[in-house]
């Protein structure tokens, strides 16, 4: 498959934070921001693969600064690295006080998406290559992050086996 540049997958979403999406502090719900990030990252992954994708995992999301109601929130995401069927996506969210123009990074995250066929089975994706300094930095660090994810996935599988699928109310003490 022909390699594509990171920039080919760039997806951006900008919106104004409205009160229904805020918590009692008047700032954006963390869960809402996570949904924005997943949404934009999925578009980037589909753009790169030109196939259906699923979210396989999200690395830790660091909430760096709160996002006030009335501010804008801009999420950008692009594919930084690919393996066989999986793609790493970097997402960055910035918030802007629309009155003063002050901007802040409010969150960054790495997500992994997997391209799937109509039965949900993983299928190959094209390679990606970096062009800018930022893209090169992210691309170079990706194999180490992927190895950490493989290790974490093994731990998750172990927890799944240990804790099982019992409902809490059926669990014996
Ligand atoms: C857009 C959305 O909202 S989708 C909804 C939320 N997501 C989901 O429902 C996905 C549920 N999970 C699944 O369907 C499956 O576990 C899949 C498709 C992610 C993986 O399928 P599996 O049959 O386990 O495939 P397999 O073990 O071969 O892994 C396939 C690839 O996914 C990668 N992968 C799987 N799980 C993870 C994970 N937790 N973190 C990072 N990468 C992962 C593997 O490393 C592999 O990558 P590679 O082919 O590039 O080397």
Image (spheres, helix red, strand yellow):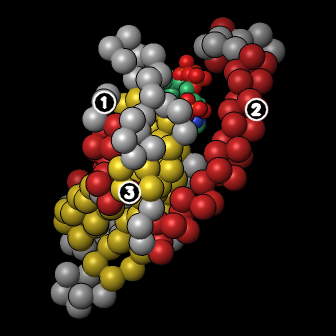
Total marks shown come to 3
> Which label sits on residue 6?
3
Residue labelled with disc 1:
51
Name the N-terminal-most of marks 2 and 3: 3
> In x, y percent, where is residue 3?
39, 46
Which is closer to the viewer, label 2 or label 1? 1
From the viewer's perspective, tell me whether residue 26 is left or right of residue 165. Answer: left
Q: In which quarter of the image is residue 54?
A: top left
Residue sitting at 76 percent across and 32 percent down? 155
State the residue in front, 86 or 38.
86
Query: Cα distance, mark 1 to mark 3?
Result: 16 Å
State the residue in front, 91 or 61.
91
> In x, y percent, where is residue 94?
35, 71
> Which label sits on residue 155?
2
Query: Label 1: how many residues lie within 10 Å, few (<14), some (14-19) or many (20+)?
Result: some
State the residue in front, 159 or 116.
116
Considering the numbered disc 2 on the image, is that residue within a helix, a strand or a loop? helix
Query: Cα distance, mark 2 to mark 3?
Result: 31 Å
The answer to whether any part of residue 2 appears in the image is: yes
Query: Cα distance, mark 2 to mark 1?
Result: 29 Å
Image quadrant containing the N terminus: top left
Name the N-terminal-most of marks 1 and 3: 3
> Assess mark 1: CB under 8 A from ligand 1?
no
Considering the numbered disc 3 on the image, is that residue within a helix, a strand or a loop? helix
Query: Label 3: how many residues lie within 10 Å, few (<14), some (14-19) or many (20+)?
Result: many
Residue sitting at 68 percent across and 33 percent down? 153
């Amino acid at each position: 498959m022909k390699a594509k540049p990171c920039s080919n997958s760039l997806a951006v979403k900008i919106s104004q934070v409205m009160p229904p999406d805020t918590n009692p502090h008047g700032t954006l719900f963390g869960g809402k921001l996570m949904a924005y990030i997943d949404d934009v990252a999925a578009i980037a992954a589909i753009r790169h693969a030109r196939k259906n994708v699923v979210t396989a995992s999200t690395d830790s999301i660091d909430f760096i600064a709160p996002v006030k109601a009335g501010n804008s929130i801009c999420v950008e995401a692009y594919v930084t690295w690919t393996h066989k069927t999986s793609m790493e996506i970097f997402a960055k969210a910035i918030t802007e006080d629309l009155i003063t123009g002050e901007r802040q990074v409010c969150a960054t995250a790495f997500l992994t998406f997997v391209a799937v066929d109509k039965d949900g089975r993983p299928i190959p994706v094209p390679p990606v290559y970096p062009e800018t300094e930022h893209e090169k930095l992210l691309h170079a660090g990706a194999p180490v992050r992927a190895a950490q994810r493989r290790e974490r996935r093994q731990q998750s599988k172990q927890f799944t086996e240990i804790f099982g699928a019992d409902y809490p109310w059926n669990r014996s003490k």
